[in-house]
Amino acid sequence: MRKWASSSPVSAGLALVVAGFIALFLAWNGAAGLDHVEGQIPYLLSGGLVGVGLIGAGLTVVNVQSRRQDHAELLGKLEELVEALRDDDGRQTPPAPRGTRDAPLRAAPEGRRTA
């Protein structure tokens, strides 16, 4: 179950999105009651732009919080991986080279350098 502090930004973002759709509906409803375009423009500017802005802000908040949670999960998994690579003395053991998991490591011949 999620903690309230971590899910509250998501709730706030969703509330902003809902408020944006309400502002769009009120702007549309107000403009629909008028027959002349000059009277509809203030509804479009005030309610329509505010509604679109609130929807954009809400979706941004939800996106940022989602990315934060993904980042925290990734850091936790990386810390677990680092702990799994440590030996009993607390030193970090290097991973085995690729393709040689079961083969013993051989030293390079004298006089030859490897890249």
Image (cartoon, rainbow, N blue to C red):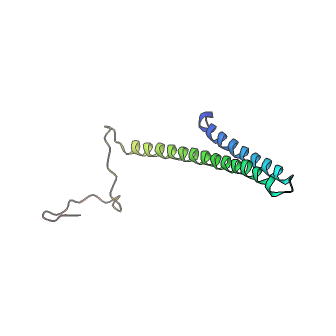
Residue furthest out toward the bottom? 112
Residue furthest out toward the left? 111
Residue situated in front as seen by the camera: 35 or 59 = 35
| Residue 3: quadrant of the picture | top right
Residue situated in front as seen by the camera: 73 or 87 = 73
Residue situated in front as seen by the camera: 99 or 34 = 34
Residue 60: x percent and y percent?
60, 48
Quadrant housing the N terminus:
top right
Q: How many callouts does the rendering have? A: 0
Is 104 situated left or right of 57 in this image?
A: left
Residue 43: x percent and y percent?
77, 50
Say which residue appears at 16% left-offset and 63% top-offset: 109
Residue 110: x percent and y percent?
13, 62
Residue furthest out toward the front? 38
Say which residue appears at 82% left-offset and 49% top-offset: 30
Say which residue appears at 49% left-offset and 47% top-offset: 74
Residue furthest out toward the top? 4
Residue 16: x percent and y percent?
68, 43
Residue 1 appearing in the image: no
Q: Is residue 97 above or below residue 14?
A: below
Quadrant housing the C terminus:
bottom left
Residue 114 appearing in the image: yes
